[in-house]
Image: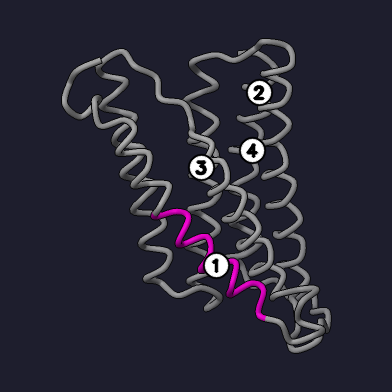
Amino acid sequence: MNIPNRITLSRIFLIPLFIFLLAYPFEWGAMNIGESDLPVSHFVAALIFIFASATDWVDGYYARKYNLVTNLGKFLDPLADKLLVSAAFILLVELGQAPAWVVIVIISREFAITGLRLVASGEGIVLAASQMGKWKTTIQIIAIATLLLHNFPFSYIGFPFATISLYAALIITVVSGVDYFIKNWHVMRGSK
């Protein structure tokens, strides 16, 4: 349980607070951000989401720089990402900020990859995140953050950046999932 793994765990522990801020209807008021009003609770939840997402970069950088990469970290890091991103997407559907079908496709890909990792684990193989998977996570985080912020700052100019980034996240999520399965198909066949 080194420092990068503790940072990853802190990301997991921030998820319930993030969920609570979005799921409970706080009456803290709202900020006018161009085309819509942004509830203060959504703004605070977005800040927590952005902070938690930033810890993903911090723990990875720290682990690589000080040679603290572990199998536990290879398992926990993508799991923490999936938990945070899945919680955010589900809440965005609840809030009417994202179409359910898009979120179903994205979360289904996450379950499929997790299943592949479990099969690999049974074979004694640890599958780390791919580079395309890291890009996928980055684009998903950007999409979620802008959706949580009700398209701020792009709402001032009427540019639908949040919507565009959501569909970009959908596309790279599907493409990276197919790529991951193709590259790791040997695991499904049972050969190393």
User: Which of the two discs, 1 and 4, labels the residue nearer the N terminus?
Assistant: 4
Disc on the earlier residue, 2 or 3: 2
Vertical comparison of 163 with 48: above or below: below
Task: Please tell me which residue is depicted at 49% across the width and 72% down the height of the picture.
Answer: 94
82 or 11, which lies in front?
82
Q: Nearer the viewer, mark 1 or mark 3?
A: 3
Circles 2 and 3 in contact, beta carbons < 8 Å:
no
> Residue 132, labelled with which disc?
3
Colouring used for the render: one colour
Q: Residues within 10 Å of mark 4 (few under 14, many from 20)?
A: many
Where 60 sits versus 81, above or below?
Answer: above
Q: CA distance from mark 1 to mark 4?
A: 22 Å
Residue 164 in the figure: left or right of residue 35:
left
User: Which residue is label 4 attached to?
Assistant: 11
Task: Between residue 115 and residue 21, name the one nearer to us.
Answer: 115
Q: CA distance from mark 2 to mark 3?
A: 25 Å
| Mark 1 in CB contact with mark 4 (< 8 angstroms) | no
Q: Which residue range is magenta in the image? A: 160-174
- Residue designated by label 1: 166
The answer to which of marks 4 and 3 sits earlier in the sequence is 4
Identify the residue under disc 2: 6
Residue 93 screen position, x and y as percent: 48, 71
Q: CA distance from mark 2 to mark 4?
A: 9 Å
Which amino acid type corresponds to the residue marked 3 in the rendered image? Met
Tag of residue 49: none
Q: Is residue 52 above or below residue 121?
A: below
Q: Could you tell me how far apart the alpha carbons at marks 2 and 1 are, in whole angstroms?
A: 30 Å
Where residue 41 appears, x then y in whole percent?
A: 73, 67
Identify the residue at image location x=70%, y=59%. Answer: 45
- Of the numbered discs 2 and 1, the one sitting upstream in the chain is 2
* Local crowd size for mark 1, using a 10 Å CA cut-off: few (<14), some (14–19), many (≥20): many
